[in-house]
Image (cartoon, grey):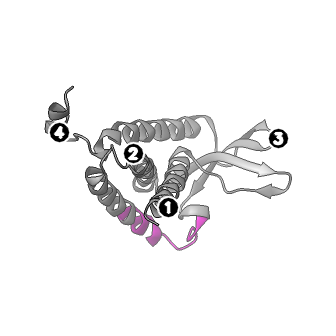
Amino acid sequence: MSEQTVRNVPWGNSGWRWLPLSVALVALDQWSKGWIEQHYEIGEYTPVFFWLDIVRLHNPGAAFSFLADAGGWQRWFFSIFAVGVSVMLVVWLRKVRLKTEPILAIALALVLSGAVGNVIDRIEHGYVVDFIHVHWQQAYFPAFNVADSAITVGAILLLWDAFADWRRNR
């Protein structure tokens, strides 16, 4: 495809080129949560390694179960917030130039996929299905899922990109 042809495509040289990654990760996230729901009862777990379990847990709150016991209003608050953030990320992705900001585009696509994956759960169930549980002896990290992993990697890439941008402009 020539440079002129690329510019005429709706996603052209923008970060929208990474939207298929977002769609694939949302699909993987939803498939994995569905598989867990079909094969595990709530609280049931399988040790994988001495530091990793697969477990079915439900999180009605936000990250690290923040506001999990808030009485139900948090379901819609977090859902509306995630939809708003997702719309903003899609708009931002459209403005990102792939040639000069590739890390930013990937980071935004990852965060977008995680936000969408978890908001689907919140709207459908009222909670997010978590199933990856990392621990070391008696220290347990909160359980997470594919969407949470995408958000985490995306956030790390956003910080990396911001730091690199700061270094370039110093």
Q: Residue type at mark 4? A: Arg
Reading the image, the residue beneath label 4 is 7
Type of the residue with mark 3:
Phe
Q: Which residue is drawn at 38% across and 66% down?
A: 81
Mark 3 / mark 2, whichever is N-terminal:
3
Q: Which of 153 and 83 is in front in this view?
A: 153
* Percent of width and height locating residue 74: 46, 69
Tell which circle, 2 or 1, labels the residue nearer the N-terminal end. 2
Q: Which amino acid does label 1 sit on?
A: Arg
The residue to which callout 3 is attached is 50
Residue tagged 2: 102
Q: Position of residue 134 (x, y in %)?
A: 72, 48
- The range drawn in magenta is 65-80
The nearer-to-camera label among 4 and 3 is 4
Q: How far apart are marks 2 and 1 (CA)?
A: 17 Å
C-alpha distance separating marks 4 and 1: 30 Å
Amino acid at the residue labelled 2:
Pro
Q: In the image, is residue 72 part of the stretch drawn in magenta? A: yes
Helix or strand or loop: what does disc 2 sit on? helix
Please indicate whether residue 48 sits to the left or right of residue 69 in the image: right
Of the image marks 2 and 4, the number of the one nearer the N terminus: 4
What distance separates the C-alpha of mark 4 from that of mark 3? 51 Å
